Image (spheres, helix red, strand yellow):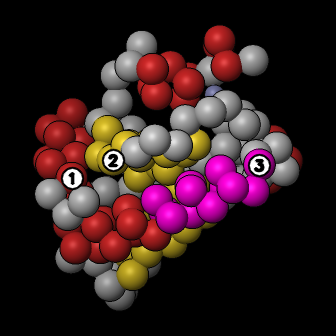
Amino acid sequence: MGDECIFCKIVSGEIPAKKIFENEATFAFLDINPSAKGHSLVIPKNHHATMLDIPEAELKDVISTVQKVGAAIMKATNADGFNVLQNNREAAGQVIPHLHFHVIPRTIGDSLKLSFGSQKAEEEELKEYEKRVKEQL
Ligand SMILES: [Zn+2]
């Protein structure tokens, strides 16, 4: 199942990504279609399609990384808050069938209407935010 999975290939390094954090069980990288600058994804290294498929202990590891990354993204982007969004299955808007949490920095008055894949980040912007967030982790 993981053989054709884009996120599994990002974890293995087969597909490049702006990695901001990695530990034994989890991996975090910048979303290339960000809803805001610094928008990141946190995933388990093992392939699990949805929140219903992952063992509880692994899910706890992922949530711990979401907490850590959320704090770093706020500092790196001078945000006032952040959203954590997670979609299960196509009907809920899940595009890549490998469990992932979106971590999106928010600023008071940013008037962001959340929708995914609506914009494409430039390489320079991704590099800048990769550096900024990594410095906070
Ligand atoms: Zn996968």
Relative to residue 102, is residue 8 depicted above or below? Answer: above
x, y percentage for residue 37? 30, 57
The amino acid beneath tag 2 is Phe
Q: Secondary structure at mark 2?
A: strand
Residue 55 disc label: 3
The amino acid beneath tag 1 is Lys
- Which residue occupies the foreground of this view, 109 or 133? 133
Q: Tell whether 47 sits left or right of 55.
A: left
Relative to residue 77, is residue 90 depicted above or below? Answer: above
Q: Quadrant of the N terminus?
A: top right
Rendered residue at 46%/59% (across/down): 65
Q: Secondary structure at mark 3?
A: loop
Query: Residue beneath label 1, please?
Result: 134
For the stretch drawn in magenta, the main secondary structure is helix
- Give the mark nearest the N terminus, 2 or 3: 2
Give the class, few, some or many, for how many residues have Cα within 10 Å of label 3's Cα (few <14, many ≥20): few
Q: Secondary structure at mark 1?
A: helix
Question: Which dot, 1 or 3, sits closer to the camera?
Answer: 3
